[in-house]
Image: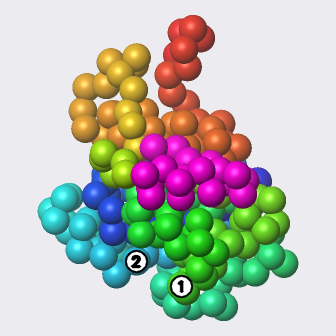
Amino acid sequence: MIKIAVAVTGASGSIYAKVLLEQLQRLRDQVAEVSVVWSDNAYTVWQHELGNEDYAKVPFKTWGKNDFMAPFASGSSSYSALIICPCSMGTLGRIAGGISNDLVTRAADVMLKERRKLICVVRETPYNLIHLRNMTAVTEAGGIICPATPSFYSKPKTIDDVAYTVIHRVLQLAGLNAEGYRWGEGS
């Protein structure tokens, strides 16, 4: 059983955060604890894209964006992964630059310095050279860039199914055994 922190930023792609949080709830038998931190813009984008305020119903412990008392703000905690979903390019840039100005970027810094899993589900298109260099810097520091780029091998039927093709990969990267399509395995 692992402990996972989830950060939701204001990048477009609230559907990915919604599906991720639903799946983490479904996989509770594999997860000892889930903590969530939201950027200010994450709420606004969620409301705009999903047309609701269901983020208020998330069944996990939520931490304020500047609450450095959150356990995953310290390397002494036993959190094994931080998933930033969606990850804005501004957040990625601050992580790449070593700027720990809020709980999201501090937690990312902790994951990198402790050699734990930092998974950034970046959501932007197209990428400019600064984005690519920031992705390179985070990757070289030990982070994982997992673009919010869906696959269609599984023939998804709904928007949630499409989003799940990305989230399934994210869950696998975090070390969880999630059900989903695996190439050549008949799932």
What's the distance in space between the residues labelled 1 and 2, CA to CA? 9 Å
Residue 85 numbered mark, or none? none
Quadrant containing the N terminus is: bottom right
Q: Coloring scheme of the render?
A: rainbow
Horizontal and vertical percent position of residue 5:
61, 66
Magenta includes 134? yes
Residue 45 appearing in the image = yes
Q: What's the magenta region? A: 129-147
- Depth order, front residue of 106/22: 106
Q: Amino acid at mark 1?
A: Asp
Give the main secondary structure, helix, strand or loop, of the magenta stretch: helix
Q: Which residue is mark 1?
A: 102
- Depth order, front residue of 95/33: 95
Horizontal and vertical percent position of residue 14:
31, 58
Looking at the image, which residue is at 40% across and 63% down? 88
Residue with the most extreme front position: 129
Residue 23 appearing in the image = no
Q: Amino acid at mark 2?
A: Ser
Q: Secondary structure at mark 2?
A: loop
Q: Which residue is mark 2?
A: 39
Q: Secondary structure at mark 1?
A: loop
The quadrant in which residue 143 appears is bottom right
Horizontal and vertical percent position of residue 63:
53, 83
Looking at the image, which residue is at 45% across and 58% down? 130
Horizontal and vertical percent position of residue 149:
39, 37
Asked whether the beta carbons under mark 1 and mark 2 sit within 8 Å of each other, the answer is: yes
Q: Earlier in the sequence, mark 1 or mark 2?
A: 2
